[in-house]
Amino acid sequence: MDADLATASACELARGVQRRDVSPVELIDGCLERIERIDGQLNSLVALAPERAREEARAARARAGTADARPFDGVPIAIKDLHCTRGLTTTFGTAAMADFVPDFDEEHVARLRRAGFVVVGKTNVPEWGTQPITEPRLHGPTRNPWDLQRSPGGSSGGAAAALAAGLVPVAQGSDGGGSIRIPASCCGVVGVKPSRGRVSLAPLLGDQLAGLVTPGPLTRHVEDATALLDVMRGYVTGDPYWAPEPERPYAAEPATEPGALRVGLITSAPLADFDADTTAAAESTARLLGDLGHAVEPVDTAKLGLSADVREQFATLWVCGIAALPLEPEQLEPFNAHHARTGHATAAPRLLQAVASLRLAARRIVAACQEYDVIVSPTLTRPPVPIGAFDGLEPDAAFAAAADYVGLAPLANLTGQPAISLPLAWAGSKEATAHADATGLPVGVMLTGRPADEATLLRLAGQAQRAVGWPAQHPAIAAR
C-alpha cells in the first residue's frame, strides 16, 4: 500500500476500490501514515482532518460494489489552503486568518467530495498566494522533495510537494499567474491551468481579478489530470465566465492520438530570459514532438506584442487585487502590505485603463497564436530557486524578481487559454527524458492551447507520456 500511494495513479486506486481489491480505509490510513512519517521534512500540509477522513473512508468502504458507489470512493486528495473547506481550517497563508474554519466547501471542492475523494488536509501556500515560492511566515517554508534546500514553487507549492513525495496521489491547486504550472515544473509533476470559466469559483470569487484565477488539478499522471478536470468542471449559476462544454469527457483524451498538429516553439521572448536548462527542455520537447509526427516551427514573438507595458498593467491589476483583500495592510506580511498600499493609492480610472489594456493585449496574443494548435515553451525561466531566494529584497524588487522567474506563465491567465506543465526534462539534460541523475532537478515544459481547447492539450500530453514514460523515477524522500 505504501508503494501504491507513492506511485499509483488515482484512477488505478479508484479502480482497485471498485473491484474491492483495495480498502478505502487502508488508503486513508496509509496516506496519513506517510504524511506523519515524511512531511516533517517538507512542511507541505498545514492542516489535517484524520478523523473525518477515516469516517468518510468507512462510508466509502460500505458503498463499494453497491449502486451508491462513487467513482473515486476513498481516494485521498489534498486541497490548497486558499480554498474554503467545510469544517477544516483555511488560513490563506496569513496569520490574520489562522483560526478561520469555513462552514462551506467551494463548489469545485464539493464536487470532488461528491465524486468520492476524501480530503485529508490542506496544503501550504504563500500568504494569499501572491508569490511563486511557498514561504509564509505563518506556516514556514515548504521544501522541494527533489532537493530540500530548494523551493517547490508557488503558490500551489505545498500541493506539488506533497504530490511529488507520494503523500497524496492527487492534489487540487489554483492558478492566477502560473500558480499551478510553476510548482508542477519545480516538483516534476503535471499541472493543468484550465480555460477561463472551465472550473467555477463559486460561491466566492467573481470578477475581482478580471478572470485571471482558476482552480485546476496537480497530478503525477495525465490520466488523473483529466479525471479531476472532469469532476471539477462546470458552470454554476451566476458565474461571470464560462467555457463551452467539451464534446466528450476529458478522460477519453489521453489515450486518443492527437493527429498531426502544428506546434509553435518559443525559447526566446520579451519578458522571459530563459536559461540554458529551460531552453534545452523546450527544445528537446520540440524534437520529441517532431519525432511523433507534429510540425514544429519557431513562433515570431514580435507578433505577440509583449513589452514592459504589459507587465506594468498586469502589476496594476495585481496590486489592486491585494488591496481588495478583506484585511488591512497592517495585517499582512511586508511584501503584501507594501503592494496593498500601492493598490489603495491607485485611482479607479487607472485600474480600468489597466484592465482594458490587458484585454487588448490578450486579443493580440491569441490572434498571433491562432495558426498553431499548441505552443511549446519553458514553464519557468530557470530550475527551482533556493529557499529564501527572494529574502532581503525590497517588495518592488521582489516582485520584479518573481516576474522574471515566472516568464511567460501569466500570459495564459491573461488570455484565458488552457495550459499544462509537463515533467519532460531535468536540469543538465539535453533530451526529454523521464530519468533524473542523482542531482537532477525537474524542469517543466509548458504547452498552451487554443481558447477552450483542453482536449488537444490532453491528447498531446498523453502521447508525450507514452513516449517518455514518466513517472519513471521519484524523489528519494518518496521511498522513505
Image: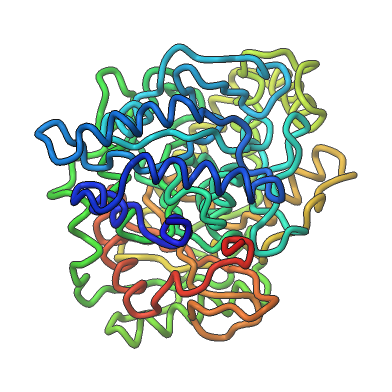
Task: State the quadrant of the C terminus.
Answer: bottom right
465 versus 448 height, above or below: below
297 versus 114 height, above or below: below
What residue do we see at 34% from left, 60% from top? 222
* Residue 360 shows in this picture: no
> Residue 326's spot in the image, x, y percent?
62, 13
Q: How was this image coloured?
A: rainbow
In terms of depth relative to the viewer, which is nearer, 213 or 52? 52
> Residue 399's spot in the image, x, y percent?
74, 43
In terms of depth relative to the viewer, which is nearer, 392 or 135? 135
* Residue 462 shows in this picture: yes
Q: How many marks?
A: 0
5 versus 179 height, above or below: below
The residue at the far right in this view is: 392
What residue do we see at 63% from left, 29% from top? 128
> Residue 293's spot in the image, x, y percent?
27, 84
The residue at the far left in this view is: 67
Left or right of 192, for residue 149: right
70 versus 51 height, above or below: below
What residue do we see at 63% from left, 81% from top? 437
Left or right of 247, for residue 462: right
> Residue 244's spot in the image, x, y percent?
20, 40
Task: State the quadrant of the N terminus.
Answer: bottom left
Q: Quadrant of residue 12?
A: bottom left
What residue do we see at 67% from left, 66% from top? 382
